[in-house]
Amino acid sequence: MNKRKSQTGMVLVIGLIFLLLMTVMSIAAMQTGGLDERMASNANDHNIAFQAAEVALRRAENFIAGNTDLNEMSLASVAPDSNNDSNWTDAVSVTLPPRVPPPQLAAQPIYVIRCAYSATPTDPASFSNPTLCSEQCYTGMNCYRVTARGQGTIATSVVVLETIFRRPLSSDKL
């Protein structure tokens, strides 16, 4: 009976310390899991924005390739700022129509077409049309710089893609 009286409850104290350690470790594991989930969600949203910009890029290339009168194309004279939404809403930007399949995008993809190589100032035609493209990329070809912008499901996920698209000067060479 003397042995029982000499115990002071150390098992209880050690058990509570272990319980506290297990609680701290489980909270840390839950926070890490939440962070991993947010990172995966952001990567997925960036991928959606990239695909939206890619769609806009391909549509612009198809528009250029299918346009029979190159002089009637509306071309931008300056490149839009990828960080400023208002620069993408002028008369020469083209917003793609909304699509039915999910996911819903924060904004529809948009593209701007510019001349890759502008006409030289010595060319008299460049004064009447400042966006006239010249043949400086390849002989018998016009080169267009297409800039496309796509957003993911949240507005902060933005991807801007740019390509040079060339096509023959006359539509009979297509």
Image: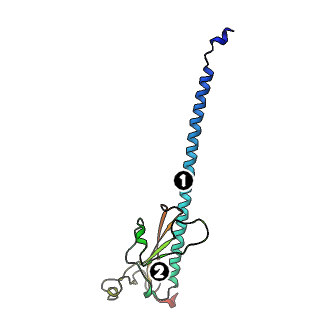
Residue shown at the point (53%, 80%) measured from the top left: 62
Quadrant of the image for the N terminus?
A: top right
User: Residue at left 54%, top 75%?
Assistant: 97
Disc 1 residue type? Met
The disc labelled 2 sits on which kind of residue?
Answer: Arg
Quick check: 127 above or below 94? below
Please give the residue where the numbered disc 2 appears in the rendered image: 166
Q: Residue at x 55, y 40 (%)?
A: 28
SS class, disc 1 = helix
Q: Name the outermost residue toward the top.
A: 2
The front one of 49 and 15 is 15
- Compared to 85, does 28 lie above or below? above
Q: CA distance from mark 2 to mark 1?
A: 38 Å
Vertical relation: 42 (above or below) 119: above
Q: Position of residue 2 (x, y in %)?
A: 66, 8
Q: Are marks 2 and 1 in contact (CB under 8 Å)?
A: no
Query: Mark on residue 2?
Result: none
Estimate the x, y position of residue 119 in percent, counting from the top left.
Answer: 36, 83
Say which quarter of the image contains residue 19.
Answer: top right
Q: Which residue is mark 1?
A: 39
Of tags 2 and 1, the one toward the viewer is 1
